[in-house]
Image (spheres, rainbow, N blue to C red):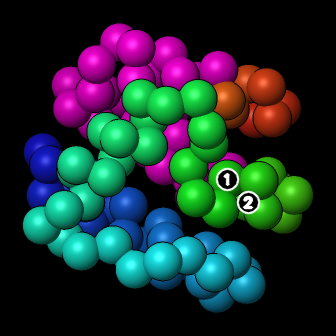
């Protein structure tokens, strides 16, 4: 399941780049560690604000973290942080 998540996240980041959202590269072997760290803090993930402005939050880490396919990979706190950020930005799944 981790590999599926990483593949989906990297694909979302590539698609975001086609929309002009510049993101730092993520190494595949460090992707899960980065995802967990990003969802534990209070700050949104990289590019979240720009994706919100462009109405493409479906490409955000937060959207993937609350996707039912990947729910088992994240703690309740991480998923709640992600959902709160999405809802605060006006994104509804």
Q: Main secondary structure of the magenta part?
A: helix
Question: Residue at (43%, 22%) from the top-left corner?
Answer: 79
Q: Nearer the viewer, residue 70 or 39?
A: 39
Q: Position of residue 62 (x, y in %)?
A: 52, 40
Q: Quadrant of residue 29?
A: bottom left
Find numbered disc 2 in the image and state the secondary structure of the residue it sits on. Answer: helix
Question: Residue at (14%, 49%) from the top-left corner?
Answer: 2
Q: Quadrant of the C terminus?
A: top right
Q: Position of residue 6 (x, y in %)?
A: 25, 60
Marks 1 and 2 in Cβ contact (< 8 Å): yes
The answer to whether residue 86 is left or right of residue 23 is: right
Residue 56 visible here: no
Find numbered disc 1 in the image and state the secondary structure of the residue it sits on. Answer: helix
The answer to whether residue 2 is left or right of residue 58 is: left
Q: Quadrant of the N terminus?
A: top left
Q: Is residue 22 above or below residue 74?
A: below
Q: Quadrant of residue 92?
A: top right
The answer to whether residue 50 is left or right of residue 86 is: right
Residue to which mark 2 is pinned: 51
Q: Is residue 50 above or below residue 42?
A: below
76 in magenta: yes
Which mark is on residue 48?
1
Q: CA distance from mark 1 to mark 2?
A: 5 Å
The answer to whether residue 91 is left or right of residue 84 is: right
Question: Residue at (25%, 59%) from the top-left corner?
Answer: 31
Which mark is on residue 61?
none
Range covered by the magenta-colored residues: 56-84
66 in magenta: yes
Q: Position of residue 38 (x, y in %)?
A: 44, 43
């Amino acid at each position: 399941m981790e590999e599926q998540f990483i593949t989906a996240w990297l694909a979302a980041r590539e698609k975001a780049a086609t929309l002009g959202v510049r993101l730092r590269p993520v190494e595949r072997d460090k992707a899960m560690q980065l995802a967990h760290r990003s969802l534990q803090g209070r700050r949104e993930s990289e590019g979240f604000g720009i994706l919100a402005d462009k109405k493409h939050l479906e490409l955000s880490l937060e959207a993937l973290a609350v996707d039912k396919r990947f729910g088992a990979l994240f703690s309740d706190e991480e998923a709640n942080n992600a959902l709160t950020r999405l809802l605060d930005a006006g994104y509804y799944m």
